[in-house]
Amino acid sequence: MPWLQIRLATLPEHSEILEDALLLAGCKAVTLIDTDDQPVYEPIRGTTPLWQHTTIQGLFEEDVDVAHLVALMDSVIAAHQLRVASISTEILEDKDWEREWMDNFKPIACGDRLWIVPSWQTPPDAAGVNLKLDPGLAFGTGTHPTTFLCLQWLNDHIQAGDTVLDYGCGSGILGLAALLLGAERMTGIDIDPQALIATDNNAAVNNIAAERYFVTTDTNDLESHYQIVIANILAGPLCDLSDAIASYLKPGQPLVLSGILAHQADTVMAAYSATITFDPVVTLDGWVRLSGRRKAVRERL
């Protein structure tokens, strides 16, 4: 059915009052978006930042009394002396949103071998390595630059028999891609139990045998070493966990890190400088991929 959407352009400090008012008025869903398209990347620990100018969107059933709703919001704004630059309403057409989203999710080439293919589409290269993905749980789909950069690295470097640790595995996209590219075994770890479900689902879609991969939330379940370690998370956790992540590699074995903004690359490399010799930085759309190898003991002395 069609829906009525109301939009209020305001300041972040006023968003909570307006959100509560919309919900009390019968709003079915509230969304906070950036009025000025100002990106907020990795937040300071313990904070939930909003943009300098925030637009609150409320979704109501179509038969709501629009004049009454706008008058109600005006009264809340006046009572609390809020700054609201504008209020607008519109009817959203009735669409099959799931179908529209599916139509817009296309296969992604990640090098000369690897494709990420929506599970409902025919692979464009039947002879390629096709990772079928059904992103029902919101983790990696390959479209984000950090995931794409990691997939490119795997396309170019995975060899038959490799063992891979996917640290912060999310949907399992990286570790499962490694298996399809020839790796022997993959272990994935993530703090979110939903990630384990997503990985299991994606493994089933790709007919990957259960004995070839293992996912867990507990570091005590991990083996002592892997031939490749890949971690696509965020710069802060990558720095905090640098000793732990590097410890899963023997000398000469490769490490791949992403989820890092270009201006954070030096900081992350510094956190690993005692144990990893890095390759040149690879950048895409303001994000970077760091790769390198574990140093020999004599190099660390």
Image (cartoon, rainbow, N blue to C red):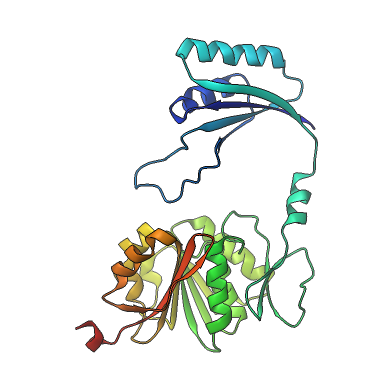
Residue 245 position in % (x across, y down): 36, 71
Quadrant into which the C terminus falls: bottom left
Q: Nearer the viewer, residue 194 or 93?
A: 93
Residue 269 position in % (x across, y down): 34, 69
Residue ID at (48%, 18%):
82
Quarter-of-image position of residue 228: bottom left
Does residue 34 lie above or below 223 as drawn?
above
Q: Furthest-left residue in view?
A: 301
Residue 197 position in % (x across, y down): 57, 60
Quarter-of-image position of residue 227: bottom left
Quarter-of-image position of residue 60: top right
Residue ID at (42%, 81%):
254
Does residue 92 lie above or below 294 as drawn?
above
Q: Nearer the viewer, residue 274 or 201?
A: 274
**Left/right of residue 76 with respect to residue 254 in the rendered view:** right
Quadrant into which the N terminus falls: top right
**Left/right of residue 225 with respect to residue 201 in the rendered view:** left
**Left/right of residue 75 with respect to residue 45 in the rendered view:** right
Residue ID at (71%, 58%):
105
Does residue 62 lie above or below 128 as drawn?
above
Residue 211: tell me if it is visible: no
**Left/right of residue 76 with respect to residue 143 in the rendered view:** left
Residue 130 position in % (x across, y down): 69, 75
Residue ID at (46%, 34%):
52
Residue 110: tell me if it is visible: yes
